[in-house]
Image (cartoon, rainbow, N blue to C red):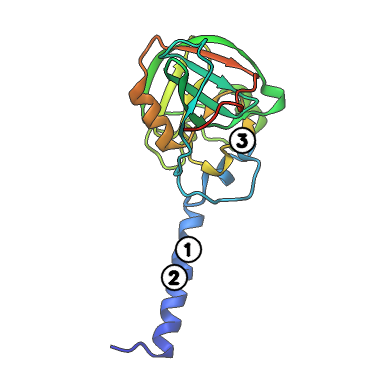
Amino acid sequence: MRIGRTGRGSALVAGLTAIFMMLSTGGASAQSWFPWDWGTESTQGGQGGGSGRSLISFPSTYAPGQIIVSFNDRRLYLVHRRGQAISYPIAAPRPQSRWQGGMRISRKMVNPPWTPTASMRAENPNLPSYVPGGHPRNPLGNRALYLGSSLYRIHGTDAPWTIGQSVSKGCIRMFNADVADLYNRVGVGTKVTVNWRNYQYASAY
Protein backbone atom coordinates (compact mmCIF):
# COMPACT_ATOMS: atom_id res chain seq x y z
CA MET A 1 0.00 0.00 0.00
CA ARG A 2 1.38 3.42 -0.96
CA ILE A 3 1.56 6.13 1.66
CA GLY A 4 0.39 9.49 0.41
CA ARG A 5 1.77 12.87 1.38
CA THR A 6 -0.67 13.15 4.25
CA GLY A 7 0.36 9.74 5.54
CA ARG A 8 4.05 10.59 5.30
CA GLY A 9 3.44 13.87 7.10
CA SER A 10 1.59 12.09 9.89
CA ALA A 11 4.40 9.54 10.22
CA LEU A 12 6.97 12.33 10.44
CA VAL A 13 5.00 14.13 13.14
CA ALA A 14 4.59 10.88 15.07
CA GLY A 15 8.31 10.17 14.84
CA LEU A 16 9.28 13.64 16.04
CA THR A 17 6.78 13.38 18.87
CA ALA A 18 8.28 10.05 19.97
CA ILE A 19 11.78 11.54 19.99
CA PHE A 20 10.58 14.52 22.03
CA MET A 21 8.87 12.22 24.54
CA MET A 22 12.00 10.06 24.86
CA LEU A 23 14.17 13.07 25.65
CA SER A 24 11.67 14.66 28.01
CA THR A 25 11.21 11.43 30.00
CA GLY A 26 14.87 10.61 30.52
CA GLY A 27 15.88 8.98 27.25
CA ALA A 28 18.84 11.30 26.72
CA SER A 29 22.36 9.93 27.05
CA ALA A 30 24.25 9.75 30.30
CA GLN A 31 26.56 12.38 28.89
CA SER A 32 23.88 15.02 29.50
CA TRP A 33 22.84 13.43 32.80
CA PHE A 34 26.39 13.26 34.17
CA PRO A 35 28.11 16.29 32.55
CA TRP A 36 30.62 16.42 35.42
CA ASP A 37 32.28 13.33 33.99
CA TRP A 38 32.06 13.15 30.22
CA GLY A 39 33.40 16.51 29.04
CA THR A 40 32.57 15.89 25.37
CA GLU A 41 29.65 16.44 23.05
CA SER A 42 30.29 13.42 20.84
CA THR A 43 28.03 10.39 21.07
CA GLN A 44 29.87 8.10 18.68
CA GLY A 45 30.33 4.46 19.57
CA GLY A 46 26.89 3.46 20.80
CA GLN A 47 25.73 2.42 24.24
CA GLY A 48 28.87 1.16 25.90
CA GLY A 49 29.95 -0.60 22.72
CA GLY A 50 33.31 -1.00 21.11
CA SER A 51 36.43 -2.98 21.79
CA GLY A 52 40.07 -2.26 21.23
CA ARG A 53 41.92 -5.14 22.84
CA SER A 54 44.93 -6.71 21.17
CA LEU A 55 47.66 -9.22 21.98
CA ILE A 56 51.09 -7.62 22.27
CA SER A 57 54.61 -8.42 23.34
CA PHE A 58 55.36 -7.10 26.82
CA PRO A 59 58.39 -6.81 29.13
CA SER A 60 59.21 -10.29 30.44
CA THR A 61 59.94 -8.90 33.91
CA TYR A 62 56.21 -9.00 34.66
CA ALA A 63 54.78 -12.29 35.89
CA PRO A 64 51.69 -13.76 34.19
CA GLY A 65 48.29 -13.06 35.75
CA GLN A 66 48.87 -9.50 36.91
CA ILE A 67 47.36 -6.28 35.60
CA ILE A 68 49.46 -3.26 34.69
CA VAL A 69 47.63 0.02 34.10
CA SER A 70 49.47 2.82 32.30
CA PHE A 71 47.62 6.12 32.48
CA ASN A 72 50.28 7.54 30.19
CA ASP A 73 49.51 4.97 27.48
CA ARG A 74 45.81 4.99 28.39
CA ARG A 75 45.96 1.21 28.28
CA LEU A 76 45.39 -1.65 30.70
CA TYR A 77 47.68 -4.64 30.21
CA LEU A 78 46.81 -8.12 31.45
CA VAL A 79 50.01 -10.19 31.43
CA HIS A 80 48.86 -13.27 29.53
CA ARG A 81 52.12 -15.20 29.71
CA ARG A 82 55.75 -14.26 30.22
CA GLY A 83 56.61 -11.66 27.55
CA GLN A 84 53.02 -11.34 26.29
CA ALA A 85 49.99 -9.27 27.36
CA ILE A 86 46.46 -8.45 26.33
CA SER A 87 46.21 -4.69 25.83
CA TYR A 88 42.91 -2.87 26.42
CA PRO A 89 42.20 0.86 25.84
CA ILE A 90 41.00 2.84 28.86
CA ALA A 91 39.96 6.31 29.93
CA ALA A 92 42.48 7.85 32.33
CA PRO A 93 41.84 10.23 35.24
CA ARG A 94 41.57 13.92 34.62
CA PRO A 95 44.62 15.94 35.84
CA GLN A 96 43.20 16.74 39.28
CA SER A 97 42.41 13.07 39.93
CA ARG A 98 45.79 11.52 39.08
CA TRP A 99 47.14 8.70 41.23
CA GLN A 100 49.36 5.63 41.07
CA GLY A 101 50.17 2.63 43.23
CA GLY A 102 49.69 -1.07 43.78
CA MET A 103 46.44 -2.79 44.83
CA ARG A 104 44.61 -6.07 44.43
CA ILE A 105 41.13 -6.82 43.16
CA SER A 106 39.00 -7.12 46.28
CA ARG A 107 35.58 -7.73 44.73
CA LYS A 108 33.93 -8.40 41.37
CA MET A 109 30.39 -7.48 40.38
CA VAL A 110 28.16 -7.94 37.34
CA ASN A 111 25.90 -4.96 36.62
CA PRO A 112 27.09 -2.96 39.65
CA PRO A 113 24.86 -0.23 41.10
CA TRP A 114 26.29 3.28 41.34
CA THR A 115 26.03 5.73 44.23
CA PRO A 116 27.82 9.03 43.65
CA THR A 117 29.94 10.31 46.52
CA ALA A 118 29.08 13.45 48.45
CA SER A 119 31.87 15.34 46.68
CA MET A 120 30.47 14.31 43.28
CA ARG A 121 27.02 15.55 44.21
CA ALA A 122 28.48 18.76 45.60
CA GLU A 123 30.21 19.29 42.27
CA ASN A 124 27.03 18.51 40.37
CA PRO A 125 23.78 18.71 42.42
CA ASN A 126 21.84 17.31 39.46
CA LEU A 127 23.31 13.86 39.93
CA PRO A 128 20.89 11.16 41.05
CA SER A 129 21.47 9.70 44.51
CA TYR A 130 21.51 6.15 43.15
CA VAL A 131 21.54 4.33 39.80
CA PRO A 132 20.63 0.63 39.83
CA GLY A 133 22.80 -2.00 38.21
CA GLY A 134 21.92 -2.73 34.62
CA HIS A 135 20.43 0.72 34.03
CA PRO A 136 21.39 1.98 30.53
CA ARG A 137 22.77 5.19 32.04
CA ASN A 138 24.78 3.59 34.83
CA PRO A 139 28.31 5.03 34.46
CA LEU A 140 29.88 1.80 35.77
CA GLY A 141 28.64 -0.16 32.75
CA ASN A 142 28.18 -3.91 32.94
CA ARG A 143 31.11 -5.01 35.14
CA ALA A 144 33.18 -3.64 38.01
CA LEU A 145 36.42 -4.84 39.59
CA TYR A 146 36.95 -3.12 42.94
CA LEU A 147 40.50 -2.17 43.94
CA GLY A 148 41.38 -2.83 47.58
CA SER A 149 39.37 -0.77 50.06
CA SER A 150 39.55 2.34 47.87
CA LEU A 151 36.78 3.93 45.81
CA TYR A 152 38.71 3.11 42.63
CA ARG A 153 37.35 0.51 40.24
CA ILE A 154 38.06 -0.97 36.87
CA HIS A 155 34.67 -0.76 35.22
CA GLY A 156 32.66 -0.45 32.04
CA THR A 157 30.90 2.64 30.78
CA ASP A 158 27.77 4.01 29.20
CA ALA A 159 29.90 6.62 27.42
CA PRO A 160 32.25 4.68 25.10
CA TRP A 161 33.33 7.84 23.29
CA THR A 162 35.34 8.83 26.39
CA ILE A 163 37.72 5.86 26.11
CA GLY A 164 41.18 7.18 25.31
CA GLN A 165 40.58 10.50 27.07
CA SER A 166 41.53 11.87 30.50
CA VAL A 167 38.09 12.28 32.00
CA SER A 168 37.56 10.00 35.02
CA LYS A 169 37.68 10.82 38.72
CA GLY A 170 40.32 8.16 39.27
CA CYS A 171 38.58 5.00 38.11
CA ILE A 172 39.81 2.95 35.17
CA ARG A 173 37.09 3.02 32.53
CA MET A 174 36.87 0.44 29.74
CA PHE A 175 34.58 -0.52 26.88
CA ASN A 176 31.86 -2.84 28.17
CA ALA A 177 32.96 -5.66 25.86
CA ASP A 178 36.56 -5.31 27.08
CA VAL A 179 35.79 -5.18 30.79
CA ALA A 180 33.56 -8.25 30.40
CA ASP A 181 36.46 -10.05 28.74
CA LEU A 182 38.85 -8.98 31.51
CA TYR A 183 36.30 -9.91 34.18
CA ASN A 184 36.27 -13.51 32.95
CA ARG A 185 40.08 -13.74 32.95
CA VAL A 186 40.94 -12.48 36.45
CA GLY A 187 39.86 -13.27 39.98
CA VAL A 188 39.73 -11.67 43.40
CA GLY A 189 43.27 -11.17 44.65
CA THR A 190 44.74 -10.31 41.24
CA LYS A 191 47.59 -7.83 41.57
CA VAL A 192 47.00 -4.45 39.92
CA THR A 193 49.84 -1.96 39.42
CA VAL A 194 48.89 1.56 38.31
CA ASN A 195 51.60 3.85 36.98
CA TRP A 196 52.47 6.46 34.36
CA ARG A 197 55.16 4.48 32.55
CA ASN A 198 55.19 4.18 28.80
CA TYR A 199 54.83 0.67 27.39
CA GLN A 200 53.79 1.65 23.88
CA TYR A 201 57.04 0.34 22.43
CA ALA A 202 55.65 -3.17 22.93
CA SER A 203 54.86 -4.62 19.52
CA ALA A 204 51.54 -6.11 18.45
CA TYR A 205 51.34 -9.67 17.18
Q: CA distance from mark 1 to mark 2?
A: 6 Å
Q: Which residue is mark 2?
A: 15
**Badge number at residue 37:** 3
Residue 64 placement (x, y as % from top left) = 42, 13
Q: Residues within 10 Å of mark 3 (few under 14, many from 20)?
A: many
Residue 68 placement (x, y as % from top left) = 52, 18
Q: CA distance from mark 3 to mark 1?
A: 25 Å
Q: Residues within 10 Å of mark 1 (few under 14, many from 20)?
A: few
Residue 81 sits in quarter: top left
Relative to 42, residue 201 above or below: above
Asked whether 144 or 21 is in front, the reply is 144
Q: Which residue is mark 1?
A: 19
* First in sequence: mark 2 vs mark 3: 2
Residue 38 sits in quarter: top right
Asked whether 34 or 144 is in front, the reply is 144
Residue type (three-letter) at the residue carrying disc 3: Asp
What kind of element bears circle 1?
Answer: helix
Are the residues at dot 1 and dot 2 in contact (C-beta closer than 8 Å)? yes
